[in-house]
Image (tube, rainbow, N blue to C red):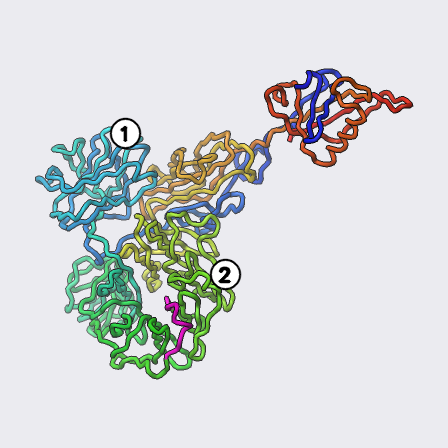
Amino acid sequence: MPKVDLLEFFDGVQTITIQLRDGVRGLRENPSTPSTLGATGGGQKFGDFDPSFSHLEQRTWVGGRGRENWSDDQTMYYDSQALWGLTEDKLFPAPLYNFAEGLRTTDDNLVDDKSWKKLINAQRFISVSTGAITADKDYLWVRRRGTPGTLTLELRANSAGDADGSVYKTVTKSTTDITDTISIFQVFDWASTQAMSSGDHIVLYGASTDTESDCWEVAVDADGAGSKTATTGSGDWAAAAFSMLYRLTDADTKRKFLFFELEGATYAVSVNDDGSASKLYINGGRGTASAGAATTLTDSGIAWTADRWINAWVKIIAGTGKGQLRQITDNTTEVLTVATWDINPDNTSRYVIIKTPWWTELSTTGLGTVKSVAVLNNIAYFAQGQSDNIRRMYDNAGTHTYADDSTNKADLLIAFPNAADGPQMWNINNTTVSATRADGDSWGNNLDFTGVSAMSIGDKSFPVTNAIVYDSRLYVAKEDDIYYEEDDKFYPQGLGLNSRPGKETGLAMVTQGLFLYFSWWRSFERLYGSTQDDVGPWRGVGLPSTRRGTISSLASLPPMILVGVDAHTGTSSMLAFQDEKYHELFRGYEAGHRLRNIYVQAIDNEAGNSRVWLSYNGELLYMDVSLDPLKDSSMLYMHEAVCESPVFDMGHAETYKFFKEIDFTSENLTNTINLEVDYQKGSDCNTSSWTYANTVYENDGTVTLDVGETKRLKYRMRMQTDDASTPPLVNAIVVKGYEVTPVKRLWNVSVKTSTRVSGNITPADTLYDWLWDVCQKAKKVEMKTSFPGIGSSGENGVVVKIEPPVTLWTRLNETKDWTGEFQLVIREQ
């Protein structure tokens, strides 16, 4: 430890000791900058215009998901759920999804508008009566508030209209199961199945210790009256002015659906994982009218369910009135009611019913295990492998008619519009890994694949996974490469895919514009001519491990491509890919539910928005998608969307910040249409740990944070609505705060020196040479003093940089002995 008036320096080789000229007054300490406030690149947009504050404004989200740091791209966000960011300068929930009907046995009460009830006090218990069903599980929309106790669901027998009968099944959930405050379509799954009689009850209740701020909430239909509430759940039930939402289902069927269009109608055929016979469904129905009038179409040869087709559309595809399209306002068992026809239909009018949640199973199809479907000349052909004949179907004046296509067999069929030779059907055989083709024909004739010799598609080591028509050629995907056909020969594209061959190669294929897109490994590729690039969702921060998977489907909805991610045991999702950016429009509601296919239904503009069908967990979901949703009054939106911001560090990772508040420029906000805001700071960023900040109930609101002593922060916005037709809108978000620059000290030092010194003080000549050496060579120099906080006793030395010295000679003799002073500027590093 140097004496009070001495400073000691060590450069790793030698120790230099200097003496202050006026004792302790020879050392003066200053901050290296006049202010600790840092000027950032956030920019001033509005507010207090104090230059010491950063206004970090985001007013568009078209850059999509996957950005780690906000300062790198101010059009992106970190992650999202059910969020639409594709519209410039707007952020709002994604389109609402719903369940198809007619594919499985269910009993449910689901509506578009969702309100919420807390399971506390007089409504701690909520019941709803059910229909008759043998139920395997139940789903409820629930959300967590704070840290509640156990959430319990019971199936109870009916007792004089109340839920006081015996308890059939009990399932409990806790905060270990539901770890976040985002609403979830929660499964309650019990052992075996339960036969429910009409009038039995679902009862949901929270813990007796739950409070207003620590409780469970359940979604309800505020316009219903089918629920009852109770304090104890036994003998004290009272009628409620709402109905709890639920969905009882039978056991899941592991399958995916293949889609196709045939004469104006959309069909789906199941491909079952267990290899059992496929089932064929039509969306809506078709037939030939028996009569018509100004506002009706009658089909006396059919027996519809009354009111089933309300809000669906009917189109006349042949006969009198061909081309007319009308929305159905009512239906009986044989009469459709619509707006006035331009030309009344008659008994020559063939029609299809489209754009409905209802799918109708077609019987006596004769199908085995379908592997693919192709439509040529208004005939649907079903490939069924090398053991079963190709099956075909056509619409015979409203009657589906089936036949084997002779003894022809196929693993994959592809219709090809050959410009020179007319429509053709290509037939892929995966036993020989080869292809043949036949000219298209009419219903009464079988396809003839014998006219062309089988063409090998590479070697037999890798099977064909898919095929598509692109750039007027047939492109075939095998596990190891993409091949194209030219003059009855198949040539490998040579894309290097054989470095990681697998069944994912080409599992999904789609064309859009000039490009061919196809899946490979856990990504997908874009091909133009011989140029290929990877455009998969792994870019940026990628998908979290629980949501990664196979690209199972690609569907074109220009200008976007819908990307299905089958996460297998994880949580599957559908992403919109546009301008090389990703936006998540759908996330699966349960881990292990697979997203196997996506299909955009062909619908006339007059019938409204495109309908997207998702083959999810062995059934079908759908959402109507508009390219400009806010200008479409028919659009419906999800009740909740989540936007998770990138990290805000004001462009400097090492500095401390104070985050004052977040301003939201917004529309449509009310007490029930709002923005809930959480945040993370410091090491909690990008973890599952969130701190609730506040809720914005009014347009252009502010959430106060007052978060300091942190180097970074991010927010999460949960956009919520109880009206599916009125989404919360966000136009801009501004994060306000300031940063503190690293605080460094500067010392002005007056040193007296001489060539004749005593003790361990460094002589003037040596000191002079050393000072000039260290200031030019960027050596590491540590300084120790007797001053507290500046490398004094018990402290580490302070690493410093010494500026070139100012030298004053006061005496010099003939022997070159001299005395003088050094004026030093020493900077803390």
Answer left or right for 514 relative to 676.
right
Kindly identify which numbered label has been placed on residue 728: none
Q: Position of residue 518 (x, y in %)?
A: 42, 63
Chain part drawn in magenta: 454-466
- Give the CA separation, mark 2 to mark 1: 55 Å
For the residue marked with disc 1, what is the amino acid? Answer: Thr
At which x and y percent is residue 548? 39, 51
Q: Residue at x 21, y 47 (%)?
A: 137
Q: Is residue 210 left or right of residue 794?
A: left
Q: Is label 1 in a helix, a strand or a loop? A: loop
* Number of numbered markers: 2
Q: Position of residue 408 (x, y in %)?
A: 28, 77
Q: Is residue 183 left or right of residue 764?
A: left
Check disc 2 and report its element: helix, strand or loop: strand
| Residue corresponding to mark 2 | 533
Examine the structure image and report whether residue 690 is included in the region drawn in magenta.
Answer: no
**Split into 4 quadrants, where in the image is the N terminus?**
top right
Residue farthest to the right?
A: 814
Task: Report which quarter residue 101 is drawn in.
Answer: bottom left
Residue at x 63% of width, y 23% of height: 791
For marks 2 and 1 on the same chain, the one whose residue lies earlier in the sequence: 1
Residue 781 visible at all: yes
| Residue on which disc 1 sits | 211
Vertical comparison of 309 with 149: above or below: below
Q: Which one is nearer the viewer's eye here, 438 or 394?
A: 438
- How packed is label 1: few (under 14 Cα within 10 Å), some, or many (20 or more)? some
Q: Amino acid at mark 2?
A: Asp
Quadrant including the C terminus: top right
> In front: 707, or 825?
825
